[in-house]
Image (cartoon, grey):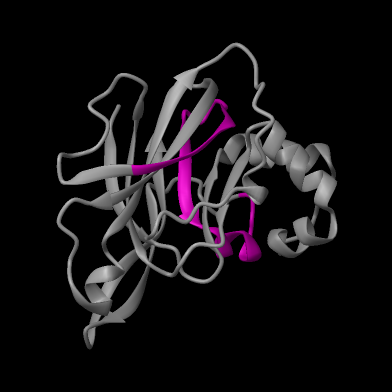
Amino acid sequence: MEKEFVIGAWIYGLAIVSNANFIRIKKQHKIRAKKMLTYFAKHNETGMDFIRQGAIIPIGNINNYNYTIFCGNKGDNRYSDNWNAVKRLGSFNLSIDEDNCFWVMQINELEDWSDDKLIDHDFLTKEVYVSNKLTEVYRAVKVPFSKGMYSITIYGLKRKNPSPGNIGEKNNYGFYFELEPTDTLSSMEDPTETDFKCYD
């Protein structure tokens, strides 16, 4: 299926998370920590196991912009005609379990983690001031997708007709997540070493 939404990167960036898989691996490693970002920073090899098993793809070191996200199967209509793909950023492992979905979230959500955080939700929001107006924005968005193993290729996008000014600049970029079914999680690309910036 195809899905489109806007989410702000906020402090540390974004992340793609397979929730049921994430919880399964967390229990496998007997992790009780709630501050998962801090935990991964102290236990790098464990964090890499989450990545190899397709539970999380961190998209870090990006500006605090509002990114338009497009998701779809390989061969779908991809993204709208208003966008150009400016950079192929890499292909990574994603394994979706029985919850039949993955999540795109602000990565700082992992620093206040609980295993039931995303259960029975389609999105998480918060209120922030935008142009002096209190506005509800996404912290995390659920993307329905069939259970299975995928190679997910990430493309950096830029508007064909960029909005001017500092405020406009924050809305000129996005990502396309292209999912292709696979029999094995074979990607050796490391998202923690990937340059996800797609700016001029």
Residue 165: quarter of image: bottom left
Residue name at image x 14 percent, y 56 percent: 161
Magenta stretch, residue numbers = 86-115
Considering only vertical position in the picture, is 55 above or below 112? Answer: above
Furthest residue to the top?
183
Considering only vertical position in the picture, is 60 above or below 152? Answer: below
Rendering coords of residue 44 (x, y %): 81, 51
Relative placement, left or right, of 145 versus 3 is: right
Residue name at image x 69 percent, y 61 percent: 37
Considering only vertical position in the picture, is 163 above or below 45? Answer: below
Residue 124: quarter of image: bottom left
Rendering coords of residue 51 (x, y %): 68, 39
Rendering coords of residue 38 (x, y %): 75, 65
Which of the pair 159/28 is nearer the observer?
159
Residue name at image x 77 percent, y 38 percent: 49
Which of the pair 56/147 is nearer the observer?
56
Relative placement, left or right, of 83 versus 16 is: left
Quadrant of the drawing holding the C terminus: bottom left
Which of the pair 200/94 is nearer the observer?
200
Residue name at image x 71 percent, y 58 percent: 36
Rendering coords of residue 140 (x, y %): 43, 55
Residue 144: quarter of image: top left
Quadrant of the drawing holding the N terminus: top left
